[in-house]
Image (cartoon, rainbow, N blue to C red):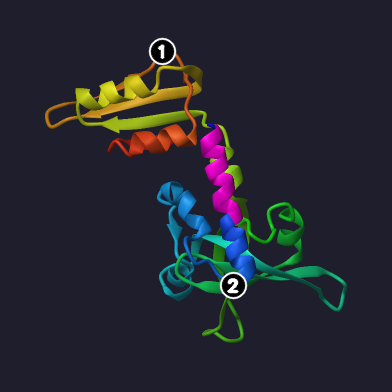
């Protein structure tokens, strides 16, 4: 555990130093450490959300690069924030209400999930702006407790893998869906187990799909 924490700290520090020195990430992107949960939250690239006319709202994962806070003539605060995802660098306006609600998450170097909503300009039908509807801290998401989880397995070997990895008692309700060629049934473990995001990722690496509820 000490080694893991040290490795994580070194990763974060390395990314921060790289960006501070050269203005972009050289060896890796901070978002790569969260890649495992992107499918779970239907994460799209900023480019996809921005350019795909079929998408009216979508979730984008991004790292905050630079924050410029300004005030309107009426004295209301807003921010112009430069973000980076794994394929592009982009800027978005964060308006007063969203800014005030999310001040603790809006810090340079933080990685977040943005729910982006396309809003058409009534006067110019071709003009569309992206409204930041919601901001979630990726670190908060990773560290949030899991209440219940479902695993989908194909055979008894997968069940054995799960039983070895889920020995410790805890607070997570576990359901196992066994789906083979000739039958399908569901098992709910009598006792709750100890499971964190790291355990989920280790299980997924064994080829077992998991859905967190």
For the residue pair 177 and 109, the one nearer the viewer reads as 109
Please tell me whether residue 3 belongs to the stretch shown in magenta.
yes
For the residue pair 211 and 166, the one nearer the viewer reads as 166
Which residue corresponds to the image point at 82% horizontal and 76% vertical from the top-left? 72
Q: Is residue 39 above or below residue 4?
A: below
Q: Is any atom of residue 112 visible in this view?
A: no
First in residue order: circle 1 vs circle 2: 2
For residue 161, side relative to residue 72 (left or right): left
Query: Do residues under tags 1 and 2 come within 8 Å of each other at their CB atoms?
Result: no
> Disc number at residue 190?
1
Which residue corresponds to the image point at 49% horizontal and 31% vertical from the top-left? 196
What secondary structure is found at the residue carrying circle 1? loop
**Of the residues tagged 1 and 2, which is closer to the observer?**
2
In magenta, the rendered stretch is 2-13
Q: Is residue 120 above or below residue 188?
A: below
Which residue corresponds to the image point at 52% horizontal and 28% vertical from the top-left? 147
> Disc number at residue 22?
2
What secondary structure is found at the residue carrying circle 2? helix
Q: Which secondary structure type mostly characterizes the magenta part of the structure? A: helix
């Amino acid at each position: 555990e000490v080694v893991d924490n040290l490795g994580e700290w070194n990763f974060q520090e390395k990314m921060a130093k790289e960006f501070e020195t050269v203005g972009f990430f050289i060896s890796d992107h901070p978002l790569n450490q969260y890649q495992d949960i992107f499918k779970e939250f239907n994460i799209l690239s900023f480019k996809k959300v921005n350019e795909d006319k079929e998408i009216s709202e979508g979730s984008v994962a991004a790292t905050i690069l630079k924050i410029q806070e300004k005030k309107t003539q009426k004295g209301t605060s807003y921010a112009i924030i430069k973000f980076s995802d794994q394929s592009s660098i982009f800027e978005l306006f964060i308006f007063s209400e969203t800014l005030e609600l999310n001040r603790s998450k809006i810090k340079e170097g933080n990685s977040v999930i943005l729910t982006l909503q396309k809003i058409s300009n009534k006067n110019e039908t071709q003009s569309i702006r992206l409204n930041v509807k919601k901001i979630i801290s990726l670190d908060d998401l990773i560290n949030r407790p899991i209440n219940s989880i479902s695993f989908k397995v194909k055979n008894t070997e997968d069940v054995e893998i799960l039983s070895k990895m889920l020995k410790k008692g805890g607070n997570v309700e576990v359901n196992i869906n066994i789906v083979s060629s000739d039958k399908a049934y569901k098992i709910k473990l009598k006792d709750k187990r100890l499971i964190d995001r790291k355990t989920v990722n280790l299980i997924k690496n064994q080829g077992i799909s998991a859905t967190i509820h």
